[in-house]
Image (spheres, rainbow, N blue to C red):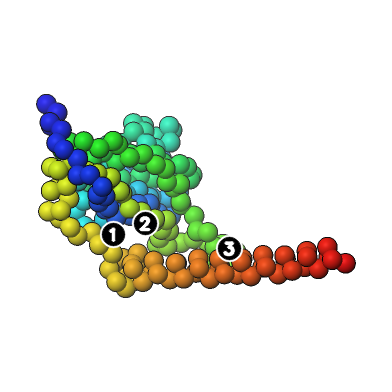
């Protein structure tokens, strides 16, 4: 039976940070028993809190849509940790759908993640990928609930955590420090572009006068 709708909290938004992505390792001599012979890597796709916090108080389930060559390509994870481990040989787009708890009365959130198995660096310079070398492709994002209903708002406020740490740590590479560093790089890039634009305008005006 659906939960009765409650009033929306007007002019208010609540955000909850998440990290999503995948890790992967090259398979060594010890292989999972059901791994096909052509599979070269073992990988894990996930959705979690920035510091591995329990996010099931507002997320009901996560659905991962794998490549159609996988048996039962649509996998539903209904309890934390919201992650899935498989083996494979190629990279592809994984559709991730996040479903929120019923009392939220919010639409499902759908997005894509490109499964990464291989390092981005020059393999010839760094040497071949070894079985214990873990590849990580992880992204930070924030889910925004605009004008949540009163019942869901209370649920969100009952667990106000999931905040980014101030500084980078081994447990959580995403932090306020990293965010500020990225903002500083963007601002520096904007200043550089503005400077180049002014220099180009000066050159154009000079040529027009001549």
The residue under label 1 is: 50
* The quarter of the displayed image where residue 94 is located: top left
Seen in the picture, residue 205 relative to 95 is either above or below; the reply is: below
Residue carrying label 2: 140
- Whether the residues at callouts 2 and 1 have beta carbons within 8 Å, the answer is yes
Residue 73 location (% of width, % of height): 36, 33
**How far is the residue under mark 2 from the one under mark 1?**
8 Å
Check disc 1 and report its element: helix, strand or loop: loop
Q: First in sequence: mark 2 or mark 3? A: 3
Q: Which of marks 1 and 2 precedes in the sequence?
A: 1
> Residue 139 or 205: which is nearer the viewer?
205
Q: Quadrant of the N terminus?
A: top left
- Graded by Cα atoms within 10 Å as few (under 14), some (14 to 19) or many (20 or more), the crowding at tag 3 reads few
| Gap between marks 3 and 1 measured at Cα | 29 Å
The secondary element bearing badge 3 is classed as loop
Considering depth in this image, is 127 or 37 the residue closer to the camera?
127
Disc 1 packing (10 Å; few <14; some 14–19; many ≥20): many
């Amino acid at each position: 039976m659906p939960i009765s709708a409650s009033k929306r909290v007007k002019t208010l938004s609540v955000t909850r940070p998440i990290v999503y992505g995948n890790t992967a390792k090259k398979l060594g001599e010890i292989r999972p028993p059901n791994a096909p012979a052509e599979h070269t890597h073992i990988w894990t796709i996930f959705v979690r809190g920035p510091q591995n916090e329990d996010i099931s108080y507002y997320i009901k389930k996560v659905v991962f849509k794998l490549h159609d060559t996988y048996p039962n390509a649509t996998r539903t994870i209904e309890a934390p940790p919201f992650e899935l481990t498989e083996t494979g040989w190629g990279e592809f787009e994984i559709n991730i759908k996040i479903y929120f708890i019923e009392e939220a009365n919010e639409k499902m959130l759908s997005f894509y993640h490109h499964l990464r198995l291989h390092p981005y660096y020059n393999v010839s310079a760094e040497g071949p990928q070894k079985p214990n070398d873990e590849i990580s492709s992880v992204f930070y994002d924030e889910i925004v609930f605009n004008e949540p209903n009163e019942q869901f708002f209370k649920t969100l406020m009952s667990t106000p955590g999931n905040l980014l740490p101030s500084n980078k740590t081994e447990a959580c590479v995403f932090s306020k420090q990293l965010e500020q560093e990225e903002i500083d790089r963007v601002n520096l890039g904007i200043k550089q572009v503005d400077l180049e634009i002014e220099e180009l305008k000066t050159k154009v005006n000079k040529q027009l006068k001549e």
